[in-house]
């Protein structure tokens, strides 16, 4: 039978047709007897023509896997957010424990897509919803089902889940203005559903923010399985050092390992052209394949294209030096200077790591690399 599972307590309620919903009067989750009752519901889950659907009243906001929705079809694993608590819709065994012997092999070889594809073929043959998790790249909706408490951040593209087989193995966060306690709390709530999560990578944080995040992750009981925080291209912290920090008062020699292996100013990087449509003009990149960046840099519009110059706070596009680098796009950016990430227009601030391609302006794809 389908269920709605309260993700804050892991308790679930099984239901049959026509379903459950919140009434306008009592604000409680309860069954209803007829689809005519939908007109009195803020939101409801119901069955129609053999499929389960979500109803959302006009003017009421419900998020489905992090995105505001007006209702529609439901799939196993979908997360419904109409205000606390969060509910997961479960219409089968989810996420499914130990479905096949390939679990261990895919976990041990997290970068081997061939194993994941073999596992996906097996899952498809057996009608398992886990098959969707094994697609490369994993759709954002699927990532949001696993990182349910971070669904909004996943939808916005500032949090990514990296999988090994059907399990989240690594979480990458690209928000330079990350609210550290809130992020750690949300990740802790996802931990029970992600028992194989071992690494967090934060891209674009300040140095001291990286150290603070490592300490918060190490002290979160639900995240005891985490082993590393990668914060910046200059190194990673072993969280075991931070978990031992309380015992190091008499050992200043070891205490140094807890501070930061990456102290000091960020190293220069090269902004390198990956490909160019031949029409877009950006000085000086279109006359040479790379440019060394040592400080904050802005993209300034010109009559026949754009130019990279010293940082200008009013410029619509800028590259800011942090632990990694941050691509900042102001709301005033004209279409001719609109950067994009993975084919989607980029707005606000996004942390950019080394070797990660992005479209600096339409027609010009670049990446940051260590300076020669």
Image: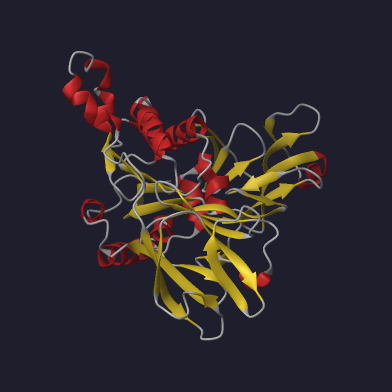
Q: What residue is rendered at 39% in x and 56% in y?
A: 353
Query: Is 23 positioned to the left or the right of 51 in the image?
Result: right
**Above or below for 96 versus 245:** below
Q: Where is residue 369? Give x, y as percent.
A: 34, 63
Q: How many marks?
A: 0
Residue 106 in sight: yes
Query: Residue 242, percent across and down?
Result: 28, 27
Residue closest to the eye, 24 or 136 = 136
185 up-or-down from 294: above or below:
above
Q: Position of residue 343 (x, y in %)?
A: 53, 69
In this picture, is 253 found above or below 77?
A: above
Q: Residue furthest front?
A: 310
* Residue at position x 39%, y 38% in the image: 207
Residue at 52% x, 32% y is: 182
In the image, 110 versus 8, the foreground residue is 110
User: Could you tell me which quadrant the C terminus lies in?
Assistant: bottom left
Q: Quadrant of residue 115?
A: bottom left
- Name the colouring of the figure: secondary structure
Horizontal relation, residue 186 to residue 312: left or right: left
How far across and down, in percent of the image, does residue 289 sit? 39, 77
Left or right of 155? Residue 240 is: left
Q: Is residue 136 visible?
A: no
Q: Residue furthest top?
A: 250
């Amino acid at each position: 039978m389908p269920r709605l599972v309260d993700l804050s307590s892991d308790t679930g309620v099984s239901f049959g047709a026509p379903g459950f919903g919140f009434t306008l009067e009592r604000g409680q989750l309860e069954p209803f007897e007829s689809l005519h009752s939908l007109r009195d519901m803020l939101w409801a889950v119901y069955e129609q023509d053999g499929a389960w659907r979500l109803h959302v009243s006009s003017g009421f906001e419900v998020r489905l896997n992090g995105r505001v929705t007006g209702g529609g079809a439901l799939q196993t694993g979908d997360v419904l957010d109409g205000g606390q608590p969060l509910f997961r819709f479960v219409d089968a065994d989810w996420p499914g424990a130990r479905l096949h012997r390939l679990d261990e092999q895919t976990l041990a070889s997290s970068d081997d897509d061939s194993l994941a594809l073999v596992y996906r073929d097996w899952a498809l043959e057996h009608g398992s919803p886990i098959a969707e998790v094994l697609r490369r790249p994993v759709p954002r909706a699927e990532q949001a089902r696993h990182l349910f408490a971070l669904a909004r951040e996943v939808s916005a593209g500032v949090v990514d889940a990296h999988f090994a087989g059907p399990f989240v193995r690594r979480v990458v966060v690209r928000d330079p203005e990350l609210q550290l306690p809130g992020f750690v709390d949300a990740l802790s709530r996802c931990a029970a559903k992600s028992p194989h999560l071992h690494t967090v990578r934060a891209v674009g944080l300040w140095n001291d923010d990286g150290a603070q995040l490592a300490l918060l992750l190490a002290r979160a009981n639900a995240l005891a399985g985490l082993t590393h925080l990668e914060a910046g291209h200059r190194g990673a912290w072993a969280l075991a050092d931070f978990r031992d920090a309380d015992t190091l008062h008499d050992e200043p020699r070891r205490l140094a390992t807890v501070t930061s292996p990456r102290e000091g100013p960020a190293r220069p990087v090269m902004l390198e052209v990956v490909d160019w449509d031949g029409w877009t003009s950006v000085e000086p990149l279109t006359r040479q394949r790379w440019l060394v960046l040592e400080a904050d840099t802005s993209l300034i519009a010109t009559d026949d294209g754009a130019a990279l110059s010293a940082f200008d706070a009013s410029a619509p596009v800028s590259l800011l030096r942090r632990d990694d680098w941050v691509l900042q796009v102001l709301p005033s950016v004209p279409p001719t200077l609109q950067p994009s990430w993975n084919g989607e227009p980029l707005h606000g601030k996004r942390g950019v790591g080394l070797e990660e391609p992005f479209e600096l302006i339409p027609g010009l794809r670049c990446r940051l690399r260590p300076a020669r």
